[in-house]
Amino acid sequence: MTSVAEAPPGSSVHLRLLADPAGSRLDTHLSQHGRLPVPDASQVIGMARDAGLTGRGGAGFPLWRKLTAVAATRRPAVVIANGAEGEPASGKDKALLSYAPNLVLDGLQLIAAGAGSAVLYAPAAAHPALRQLIDQRRAAGLDRVPVRLVAAPDAFVSGEESAVASAVAGRDAVPADKLVRITDSGPDGSPTLVQNVETLAHLAMIARYGPGWFRTAGTYDEPGTFLATISGAVASPGVVEAGYGVALGDLIAAAGGATTPLSAVLVGGYHGGWVPADPALGVSRAALTPYGGSPGAGVIMALPAGSCGLIETARIAGYLAGQVAGQCGPCVNGLPTLANTLTDLANRRARPGLPAEVERLTRLVTGRGACRHPDGTARLITSAMRLFHADVDAHLAGRCLSEGSYR
Amino acid sequence: MSRVHIDWTACDGRGLCAELLPELLAEDEWGYPVARGDMNVPPALEPAARQAVDRCPALALKLVSARSA
């Protein structure tokens, strides 16, 4: 899933991070963008704040606030570029690490100003190429803070912030309790900063071209571009770059267009939400909030009209239930129960009170884990129960709208 | 005011906290504590809350300042 789409004429899709097809080469990168400026830590905070750069890993937290929290400790930090991408429907971090790894490594150096060590956390399959590039950059005198590669296990929660910090500290890649923030004190006691690789690539562009340039894409409240991974019923599934607020239809068009009429679109990821397949719907936090969604990690999954949204959601819920880290009782017990209950509804094993039971379980698991895995799973299911309410009614009556038949 | 914090990675659902602090905590169907409200501890319940924290066999409960997230 690493094809990168060209922008169709007249659309608001445009390429920044993925503009350069040879960006993985250091010489091409340097001739395209020049050497990275060397701002100090407070200048980096200032440019991240002025640009309005938010985390691209899903949560959308402002980068400058985390940078400020880490700087306030006045202790050397561990800084980590997070390329784990445990989300199965997402391929943008993998694409970025293969198309423009130099931007990621530039961004890592920017947040590493004053840091004790820098880490690139990425799937082991990407390590050989990255290792070579890291050595090449070091030899060229580009990276002042040495970069260590740490392997990200292929698991949904392995990219969660505290799981990343734990893995980098040599422990299991599982989430930790949040009583102490890792920006204050991570697993080894050092302040720890985890940033998605795409966020760092944007920062590398901002350091060169300025916050004002960054803000020429996106909306006033949600500036900049983001990488979207478009899959499902589209002609050319792959990664597309666009400004926040881009119309859903433009993103689908950039992925070759829908191959069949669509009934709904999953936005954000497996922890995201289902929205109507409205081509005019903006992909921004502001436009998606009414649906309980957000651009999240940029996942766009198009559901064809012939597929049942409840069956698809039950499939994802079953996957998510299988991806619990095994630490927190309400998640370990609640997610499989929730997924099974939803599966009963999806498979038309109707019984009285089934939708109410799904709703009760979503509320029961929410907020009761070390990480947001239960909350995100509940959010996805809640959005499905809302958007597919006509399907819910049909299933309770033993029918399925996407089949139009009785069973 | 203080607040009860549950470290879910440590909690193994022994259920003692829900017995000692029934005003704040119930048990779910698997025996894990469920907050009845926001987990803030009114002054009158402070002694019971401390007892629940001290007696948790998994050391999964803490009393924290109600402000910290």
Image: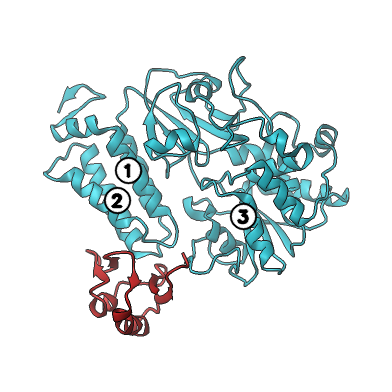
User: In this orientation, which residue lies closer to the viewer: A228 or A238?
Assistant: A228
Tag of residue A282: none
Instruction: Check if mark 2's residue and mark 1's residue have beta carbons within 8 Å.
Output: yes
According to the picture, the residue beneath numbered tag 3 turns out to be: A65
Position of A232 relative to A285 (above/below): above
What separation in Å lies between label 3 and label 2 (alpha carbons)? Answer: 31 Å
Quadrant of the image containing the N terminus of chain A: top right
Q: To which quarter of the image does residue A181 belong?
A: bottom right
Disc nearer the start of the sequence (3/1)? 3
Disc nearer the start of the sequence (3/2)? 3
| Pointer 1 chain | A
Give the mark toward the camera: 3 or 1. 3
Disc nearer the start of the sequence (2/1)? 2
| Pointer 2 chain | A
Instruction: Check if mark 3's residue and mark 1's residue have beta carbons within 8 Å.
Output: no
Chain B in the picture: what colour? red
According to the picture, the residue beneath numbered tag 2 turns out to be: A362
Residue A315 is situated, as x and y percent measured from the top left of the image, at 34, 40
Residue A17 is situated, as x and y percent measured from the top left of the image, at 68, 34
Q: To which quarter of the image does residue A204 belong?
A: top right
Q: Residue furthest right?
A: A140
Residue A183 is situated, as x and y percent measured from the top left of the image, at 60, 63
Q: Secondary structure at mark 1?
A: helix
Quadrant of the image containing the C terminus of chain A: top left
Q: Secondary structure at mark 2?
A: helix
The disc labelled 2 sits on which kind of residue?
Thr
What separation in Å lies between label 2 and label 1 (alpha carbons)? Answer: 8 Å
Identify the residue shown where x is 52% and y is 21%: A250
According to the picture, the residue beneath numbered tag 1 turns out to be: A381
Chain A in the picture: what colour? cyan
**Is A360 on the left-hand or right-hand side of A19?**
left
The disc labelled 3 sits on which kind of residue?
Arg
